Image: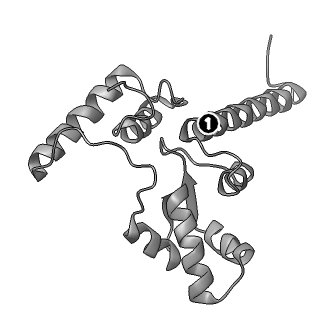
Amino acid sequence: MELNGSHSVASAAARLCRGRHDHFSTWEHPACPECWDVALQADKEAATAAGLPEVCEADPNLVDEVAVARAVAGEPVELTVAEWRVAKVAVMRRRGVSATRARRLLSRHVTVIDALGAPIESPLLAAVVAGHVSSPARVVALAASRRLRRRSERRAAFFAAAGAAGELVA
């Protein structure tokens, strides 16, 4: 199996790499080789300890019911897009509110993540939920490009402010 975003351990490897190296994950290169090795070894050890097969296919539609219940209860939690959809419906039913109100209630404490575990911002999330962007690889690519653009804008603003204050020396 290729070491890309479709690998069952890609999310763990990408999160590890972001934490260690502040890496911007892409579908083709979710993590560096070192982080891949650590994530694959940890996965193999966990599978062996639990008596599970070493290789399992990733399921992007898998819903963690515990995470959804925590989100509906108002606890801070990270959800996949599939889990977020289930949580939104649960909030609508439980509180008798509209989809818009349920989305606002969830957005206070829920972070929606892409297939590699990186946060998805509101504008992109709206497009994903509406079905305009359905490929996990495309969602990862769009989310990464938005984060990269925001980081560049923040850096440009910092240097502009520092230059205006006379703090930068040529």
Report the amino acid beneath label 1.
Arg
Instruction: Kindly indicate the quadrant of the structure image that contains residue 135.
Output: top right
Looking at the rendered image, the quarter that the C terminus falls into is top right
Q: Residue furthest right?
A: 164
Give the answer, above or below, for where 158 lies relative to 34: below
> Circle 1 sits on which residue?
138
On screen, residue 92 versus residue 101, left or right, reads left
Picture coordinates of residue 152 (x, y %)? 73, 29
Residue sitting nearer the eye, 20 or 92: 92
Give the answer, above or below, for where 113 lies relative to 40: below
Picture coordinates of residue 71 (x, y %)? 50, 72
- Label 1 neighbour load within 10 Å: few <14, some 14-19, many 20+: some
Number of numbered discs on residues: 1
Give the answer, above or below, for where 136 lies relative to 93: above
Name the colouring of the figure: one colour
Q: Residue furthest top?
A: 170
Which residue does the image show at 67% across and 50% down from the upper left?
Answer: 121
Which residue does the image show at 79% across and 20% down from the upper left?
Answer: 168
On screen, residue 139 versus residue 73, left or right, reads right
Which residue does the image show at 39% across and 70% down from the upper left?
Answer: 65
Picture coordinates of residue 102 (x, y %)? 66, 76
Instruction: Kindly indicate the quadrant of the structure image that contains residue 6.
Output: top left
On screen, residue 110 versus residue 33, left or right, reads right
